[in-house]
């Protein structure tokens, strides 16, 4: 029997593109992986969509009757991880993304050659609903320290969805407690698993193929707000994580916080942002109380 040393955990809620996600796994050249489909109390018939792939994929299906969604994402990842058997590498995969045919093989080979590395990553390309290539994301270097990865994501705005990361099982389990207490952004897992002095490795080839979320999901104001709050929590955690080696200079930090504040501004008044969202503290620290508030306001309304 072939040893399966890589687990692809599909966080399943939307069924619209699940067939394409599973097809991309079915077409992998390297078959040394197991698929765990974790149904987060979806209103769609997730289980009914799996029949076509039962003979070609080593697959386990689990339905959770309580939806955790965005608000309890850390707890959902933990309960999904508890289902994984003895695989040494784990990827939390979205139900509407795909992998290029060589992705699993390239990650497994890189992991075998670099046993000291805890986190691996795929560059991202973008596809439409028909899986047609629509664009290429900014590329990452083959070896990156966490500080360089942080700057690449937030200063260069390079794509880094959770589905593009593969974790050593032991490192992932050590990092899971970082997102249990509050609903932090999934990127917390990436940095906690890599460690402040570690590195993330990206093969030159092999791609995550990312598809935009359906409009009814991405345009939900409550979801947008929850993601913004997650990111704020992540930024606060990252200051603790990096300490005096924080990768952003004051200007970068202000622009970063302003960008995420602006993303939630249509759903919140400025007073609510100042009260609920902590962006204004960065402006206050860098520019002084009065001037910082004026700069924040101009950023939000321009």
Image (spheres, rainbow, N blue to C red):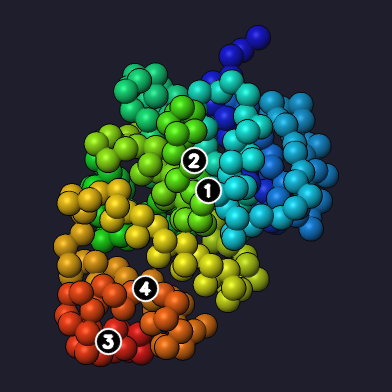
Most extreme residue toward the front is 181
Q: In the rendered image, which quarter is residue 70 located in?
A: bottom right
Which residue is disc 4 drawn over?
A: 278
**Element on which disc 2 rests:** helix
Q: Position of residue 51 (x, y in %)?
A: 81, 37
Instruction: Check the picture and name the quadrant holding the C terminus.
Output: bottom left
Q: Write down the residue under mark 1.
A: 180
Judging depth in this view, the residue of 153 and 133 nearest the camera is 153
Q: Which residue is mark 3?
A: 293
Q: What residue sits 63% from the left and 33% below the top? A: 82
Q: Which of the pair 210/37 is nearer the observer?
A: 37
Residue 37 image position (x, y, % from top left): 69, 39
Can residue 158 be seen here? The reply is no
| Image quadrant in which the N terminus is located | top right
Q: In the rendered structure, which disc, 4 or 2, sits on the residue that comes first in sequence? A: 2
Q: CA distance from mark 3 to mark 1?
A: 33 Å
Q: Which residue is mark 2?
A: 176
Label 4 neighbourhood size at 10 Å, few (<14), some (14-19), many (20+)?
some
CA neighbours of label 2 inside 10 A, class few (<14), some (14 to 19), many (20+): some
In what element is the residue under mark 1?
loop
- In this view of the protein, can residue 48 be seen by the observer? yes
Q: Position of residue 231 (x, y in %)?
A: 42, 62
Q: Quadrant of residue 50?
A: top right
- Which residue occupies 35% across, 20% down? 115
> Where does the image place residue 33, in percent across and percent down from the top left?
58, 25
Q: CA distance from mark 3 to mark 4?
A: 12 Å
**Marks 2 and 1: CB-CB under 8 Å?**
yes
């Amino acid at each position: 029997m072939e040893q399966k040393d890589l687990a692809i955990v599909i966080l399943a809620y939307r069924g619209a593109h699940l067939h394409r996600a599973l097809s991309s796994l079915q077409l992998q050249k390297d078959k040394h992986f197991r698929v765990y489909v974790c149904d987060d109390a979806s209103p769609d018939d997730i289980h009914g969509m799996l029949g076509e792939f039962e003979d070609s994929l080593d697959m386990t299906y689990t339905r959770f009757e309580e939806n955790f969604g965005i608000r309890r994402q850390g707890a959902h990842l933990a309960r999904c991880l508890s289902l994984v058997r003895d695989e040494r590498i784990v990827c939390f995969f979205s139900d509407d993304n795909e992998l290029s045919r060589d992705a699993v093989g390239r990650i497994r080979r890189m992991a075998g050659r670099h046993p000291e590395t805890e986190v691996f990553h795929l560059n991202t390309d973008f596809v439409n609903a028909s899986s047609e290539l629509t664009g290429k994301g900014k590329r990452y270097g083959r070896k990156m320290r966490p500080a360089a990865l942080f700057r690449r994501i937030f200063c260069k705005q390079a794509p880094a969805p959770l589905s593009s990361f593969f974790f050593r099982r032991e490192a992932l389990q050590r990092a899971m407690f970082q997102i249990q207490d509050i609903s932090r952004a999934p990127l917390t897992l990436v940095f906690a698993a890599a460690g402040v002095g570690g590195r993330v490795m990206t093969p030159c080839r092999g791609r995550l193929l990312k598809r935009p979320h359906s409009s009814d999901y991405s345009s939900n104001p409550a979801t947008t707000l929850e993601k913004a709050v997650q990111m704020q929590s992540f930024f606060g955690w990252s200051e603790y994580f990096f300490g005096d080696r924080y990768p952003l200079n004051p200007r970068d930090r202000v622009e970063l916080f302003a960008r995420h504040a602006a993303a939630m501004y249509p759903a919140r008044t400025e007073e609510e942002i100042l009260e609920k969202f902590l962006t204004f503290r960065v402006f206050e620290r860098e520019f002084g109380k009065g001037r910082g508030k004026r700069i924040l306001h101009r950023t939000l309304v321009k």
